[in-house]
Amino acid sequence: MTALLLSLPLLALLSAAVVRGMIARPLLDRPDGRKAHARPTPTAGGVGVAAAVAAGMALLWAAGDPGPAQHAALLGAALAMAALGLLDDKLDLPPLPRLFGQAAAAAVAMAGGLVLETIALPFLGPVPLGALGPVITLLWFLVCTNAVNFLDGADGLTGGSLIVSCLMLALVGLALGAPFVVALSLCLAAGLAGFLPFNWPPARIFLGDVGSQGAGFLLAGLGVAAALAAEARMSFAIVPLLLAAQLFDACFTVARRALAGERFWQPHRSHLFQMAIRSGWPVVRVARLHIGFAAWHGLLALWFLTLPPEAKPLPLLVALMGQLFWLWVVLRAMRRASLGFSIPP
């Protein structure tokens, strides 16, 4: 682990070098009516992030710390997820093939042992999940992967907020005695740190599906790993807490579009962060706000670890109240700008 810690700056530099290469020989994301950028912009900067994660774990294994089979299974599945994302960046895959690919990658991680078998609930303690365990685990992989992917639509937002979330998750991993969670969180943070300077507004390159789906999938797996490390402390809730902003925005938007009779799986520009930008908020302000959300939710996660079982819902409720307040702020900004959620043709 010491060798990995010392190598984190080198991993960030590796990510930055790969990202510069992706800018020099770009895969372009071309604008259309449902995208915020006005000119063709390089994408797939997440290739650099994936390279840093893979290099960091290779270094750890070379130092003689292979860990359990779960580690290799999750890393292999996450890299496969990133490869699928790169294919999606190139070909713009339809929703169903993308979803099947995500499920296949989740199956690989689950086959390696990352399956929830019990979940701790306040007042009830550990509750066996039985046959529901694999189903809940699969759904979690899909929800987390797509929630992060959905919010990758503004310069600096996803990269900046996920760096903070990863650093907070590393602290949680230390508290839980889960070195694998610490190692992968730091590798992902280093990879994102190398990417972020090129994505800060105005972005020179986007993370792309290779980065957003790969990072979301990896964080989903780390959430399961944290739960397996300390089931009795209801630790499965930690990653949902860290990603509360992404999960709230994604769930609210999908539910709203479904109730409105829209095809919620199709591309759009009606996420809350997008509506804030369309209402006049500067992109930098929205990115900084979400970085602040990540820091706040990280502090809530650390508080979560100190609470007795019956009080553990409190940080989750505080995070939910914050996101409901953000929803109110966005709706108020939309009213002032005379905007609705729908986009004119």
Image (cartoon, rainbow, N blue to C red):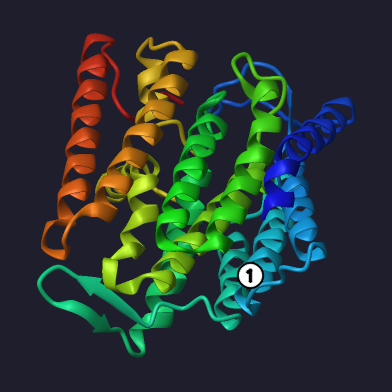
Residue 271 shows in the view? no
Q: In the figure, is residue 70 to the left or right of 307?
A: right
Q: In the figure, is residue 323 to the left or right of 10?
A: left
Q: In the figure, is residue 307 to the left or right of 299?
A: left
Q: Nearer the viewer, residue 299 or 222?
A: 299
Q: Is residue 211 above or below residue 342?
A: below
Which amino acid does the dot numbered 1 rest on? Answer: His
The residue sitting at 32% across, 47% down in the picture is: 301
- Residue 315 position within the rendered picture, expressed as x and y whole percent measured from the top left: 21, 47
Q: Is residue 320 above or below residue 40?
A: below
- Residue 38 position within the rendered picture, expressed as x and y whole percent measured from the top left: 63, 16
The residue sitting at 10% across, 72% down in the picture is: 123
**Total labels drawn:** 1
Q: For the view shown, which residue lies furthest in the front direction?
A: 2
- Residue 183 position within the rendered picture, expressed as x and y whole percent measured from the top left: 61, 55
The residue sitting at 12% across, 56% down in the picture is: 311
Q: Nearer the viewer, residue 40 or 168?
A: 168
User: In the rendered image, which residue does mark 1 sit on?
Assistant: 71
Quadrant containing the N terminus in the rendered view: bottom right
Q: Is residue 1 above or below residue 155?
A: below
Question: What element does badge 1 sit on?
Answer: helix
Mark 1 Cα within 10 Å, few/some/many (few <14, many 20+)? many
- The quadrant holding residue 333 is top left
- Residue 59 position within the rendered picture, expressed as x and y whole percent measured from the top left: 79, 56
Residue 127 shows in the view? yes
